[in-house]
Image: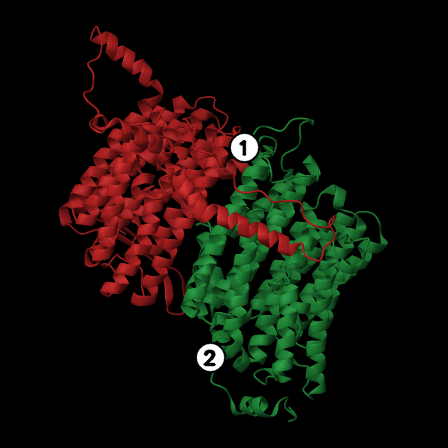
Amino acid sequence: MDLSQAALVFLVLAPGVIFGILALVWLAGGDAPERVISRITGGTFSASVLALVPIVWRVVSTGAPVTVTFGNWFAVGSYHFPLVLMADRLALPFLGMTVVLSGLIGQFSATYLHRERGFLRFFLLLDLFACGSLVTFSAGSFDLLVGGWEIVGITSVLLIAFFQQRPAPVENALRVFAVYRACDIGLLVGVFAMHHWAGTASFAGGLPNLTRNQASTVCLLLLLAAAGKAAQVPFSGWLPRAMEGPTPSSAIFYGAISIHAGAYLLLRVQPLLARSTLASVLVIAIGVATAVYGTITGRASADAKTSLAYASLTQVGVVFVEIGIGWRSIAVAHILGHATVRTLQFLRAPSMLHDYHQMHSAIGGELSPTGRFLEGLFPEQVQLWLYRWALDRGHLDTILDSLAVYPLMRLSRLFAKLDGLGLSRTASFPGEAAIPVRSPAGQGGG
Amino acid sequence: MTPQPVLVLTIAAIAIPWFGAILAAIGQRRARAIGCVVSLGSVLASALLLRAVPPAESLVQALMLLFSCLTLGATLVLPRRDCDSRMIAGILFVLGSTLLGYSAGNLLVLLLAWILSTVPFFAARWFRARTWRPRMGLLISSIALALAIALIAISGHGMSIDRLISRSPGGMAVFSLLVVAVIFRKGICPAHAWVADAIEGGPAIPTALLLNGHFGALLVAKLIVPLFPYTAHNLFPVLSYLAIATALYVAVRALTENSPRRLLAFIALSQSACILAGLESGTAEGITGALVHWYVVTVSTMGLIGVLRLLEVRFGENLTASKYLGLAEHAPRLAVFFIVFGLALVGLPGTLSFCSQDLLIHGTLASHPQTGLLLPIATAMNAISVFRLFARLFLGRRRTGFTVMADALPRERWILTAGVLFVVLGGLFPNAIVARRSAEADRVEQVIHTPMRPAEVFDRRLGPSRRPL
């Protein structure tokens, strides 16, 4: 194992190891002080940034990816789960973005969450999230990518429920979790399909060899997962709900890394995508729909974080369009730029009014208007309709509820009645209650 | 090791718990100590046994060790309120009977173990169910197995399982009775309701132990597949559909359930059905996934139900998932144990279930592409139910109205940490477990896919064989 390979292993494992140590110490009854926690996390990410140097050097100088093969994680018959880490030209920007932004968020949160009751919990989840993201971006096979992907999802949900005393964040976390799990079925089945047709889901030596129809099927399945993770239409309803989490986590998840994981997945399968017209058109259509949806809905958002979330959504929609067209490099550059700017905006969101007033007094008068808004071009009737549409966030949650959630709940209640057949009333069971489906109104930042 | 020490160790592993059960029943004091020492003895005997057999043929011994460890954990984690001599005696009796069932090489012994493991659940002072269904479910499964074995005996075959392999003894009638026994014991739809009733009404931890014996899956692996390879080959899709339907049905059912015990029962049932679906997939991946998932389900459901019981003891038995109880503020470590065990049950990466689910999904999708798709859907719904229950029990406004409650006590904390370490280390280094089970899976797969032998054709055409063995 040479230096760059060792650096890649360190990069991926370090946050996970820190998570494991801090978690075990806490479980055993220990209570690390805030300063220790933040310094350990900060030190880890600083070291990870240094570890990036030999990897970047190797990739840039040789043009070949840094690959570390550990063999098979497990194998049964002809099926095997390869444990391969790979940092190529696509993965490297995402790896860099993850360690740099995670480190920055760690530093920011040390002050922002000072004396917060969930300080340790936040840092544990941040470390675990970073590990999951790094596994996702450095995976050499889709099997391993699924592992990192799921970790990103669960940490995201647990951070949305960070302010656990209030019911709203918890309910929203459950909603987000449900959307993630439903969409991840596409990823699981897509990976199975690759194994089934090509005998492997590894892409370390190039993508699996599939026919056009097979490629279409795989891409459509992966698109479901990518759309869920990136909050694309029709799954966009979860994004404003996710703003219930603390601001630093909103910044790194929904401004930078998690929201772009779906785009990364599509970039990874882009050669397959290019072979499927249907999937490419669908990616573009979803991207366009999301961009339009995001820009309209964001204008009716009452709070800063939700507005930023919708602005984020709009940009990710545009990234999807770029991927669908086949502009890979532009998409990567767009993601990097967008993630950096959006993280900054999210982190400044709590002090936005302060910033505004400061700027206001600095120029010694009123700030000049930002110009005409696009919606002013429409007739008033259309404007009113659009406003109502945007206020209910495009009715997306309502549509999903009526198509999926409520029928499922009704079916569940029917099953409960069936289960109670043949029992006396006193012996039958009390409990039914739907997963709470509340209107998205009244959600704000944490 | 020669066969004799293996036999001695097996007898020791089984006899020690029974002896301990008698001791606990007679002596009214120090029940927990007796339970711990006795289960530890069983753990040691099973561990030595596991070392004594070749790794590729160690499924039974591994299950014996797992169940002994589980019982040890149960006796340690049992709240003081529940820990009387009667309870410990019952638990040890179930342990001895279950180990007997695992190691049985004779049909009559298997039947005896099957019935004995249910005996405590017919004792009204030990097991109080709110409905008649648990006892009925166990009774029907025992009667079905007894009838199947009686038919095998009438048809002139011997009682040794090894000598009956691939002979389809008793033909379709016996096969059907065995399937009925599996359906009722395992809680496969439409006979699933008794499991939730048992968990809700009965003593939580001992009932979880009974269910985690997984005698239904044992019957499939030990009798149905080896004895009826031809029939199994043809009828397994039907069984597999039933198992997958059960996994989905109870997963949907769990979505609106508010009783934490019932909700956990449904999730456990759904995941147990996945074991059966994997075993019946007839693929090496599916069967290995099922065998590994057996471990996962056993440890995780035991952990979940254990944590729930600890919460009930601390905060009252009227816990509900209909509102937010905010218990994490009082018991943060129990909250962490709960969510780790819960997510470990439904495929969290980094835990053993990630590997087992991966293999299960590949196996079932490969054998039944359309219905196999339902398995990841069921697992996704179970994950939502787990998170919902976690959120309702542990999150929300801090609950007031009682004095400060203890979080996990050291005794509970260490044993729950051991469980968490098992699922996590198993997930990080799965090959240690998967490789061992893979060899057995290959054998089972070979048995199912081996072409029909002339003897079986004869059996099929002329009904039960009259030929002497």
Colouring chosen for the image of the structure: by chain
Amino acid type assigned to the residue bearing label 1 in the image = Gly
Chain letter for green? B
Residue A348 placed where, x, y %? 31, 22
Residue B439 placed where, x, y %? 48, 71
Q: Which mark is residue B305?
A: none
Amino acid type assigned to the residue bearing label 2 in the image = His
Q: Tell me which residue sits at (27%, 31%) in the image.
A: A382
Vertical placement of residue B305 versus B374, above or below? above
Residue A181 placed where, x, y %? 43, 48
Q: Quadrant of the N terminus of chain B?
A: bottom right
Q: Which mark is residue B449?
A: 2
Q: Tell me which residue sits at (59%, 28%) in the image.
A: B398
- Mark 2 Cα shell of 10 Å, populated few (<14), some (14-19), many (≥20): some
Q: Tell me which residue sits at (22%, 9%) in the image.
A: A366
**Mark-to-mark CA distance, 2 and 1:** 54 Å
Check disc 2 and report its element: helix, strand or loop: helix
Nearest the viewer among B306 and A444 is: A444
Q: Tell me which residue sits at (70%, 50%) in the image.
A: A428
Nearest the viewer among B356 and A330 is: A330
Please state which of the two labelled residues, at mark 2 or mark 1, is closer to the viewer.
2
Q: Chain of mark 2?
A: B
Nearest the viewer among B136 and B80 is: B136
User: Residue B429: which quarter of the image?
Assistant: bottom left
Picture mark count: 2
Q: Which mark is residue A30?
A: 1
